[in-house]
Image (spheres, rainbow, N blue to C red):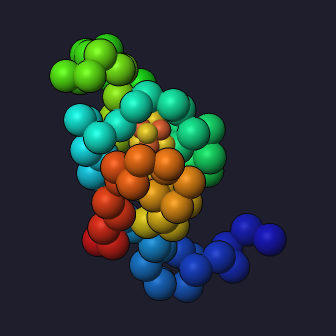
Amino acid sequence: MAGTGPEHRGLAKAKGYIQIDQELCKGCGVCIFFCPKECITTSTKLNAAGYLPATYSTDSECTGCAVCALVCPEVAIEVYRA
Ligand code: SF4
Ligand code: SF4
């Protein structure tokens, strides 16, 4: 129902951001697939190992849920809560 969510009761929504280690990332795309907020895209710049790494979109609405970090096989993602 409209007007009953936490944001309408004056409570802050969970906010966060992530940092992706561009050199650890192998560009597998798993984090991109699983992020519920579509916060992650693929870089257009190759890393030193020759992969196109995942990149955080700074204008996205990351909730800090940490799903991306949990599914990353390279442990390349750090999650921060704002
Ligand atoms: S913490 Fe959650 S919302 Fe933020 S980028 Fe990762 S999966 Fe997406
Ligand atoms: S899941 Fe990890 S290794 Fe795969 S694209 Fe995302 S950051 Fe890179």
Residue under the point 51% across and 67% down: 65
Q: Which residue lies furthest to the left in this view?
A: 48
Q: Nearer the viewer, residue 45 or 7?
A: 45
Q: In which quarter of the image is residue 24?
A: top left
In-image side of 37 versus 4 (left or right): left
Q: Position of residue 51 (x, y in %)?
A: 35, 20
Residue under the point 35% across and 37% down: 25
Say above or below: 73 vs 78: above
Q: Nearer the viewer, residue 21 or 64?
A: 21
Q: Which residue lies furthest to the front in this view?
A: 49
Q: In which quarter of the image is residue 40?
A: top left
Q: Position of residue 52 (x, y in %)?
A: 36, 20
Q: Which of 53 and 61 is in front in this view?
A: 53
Q: Can residue 57 be seen in this view?
A: no
Q: Where is residue 70 in the image (x, y as percent from the top left)?
A: 52, 61
Say above or below: 6 vs 28: below
Residue under the point 73% across and 68% down: 2
In-image side of 17 versus 69 (left or right): left
Q: Where is residue 30 in the image (x, y as percent from the top left)?
A: 57, 39
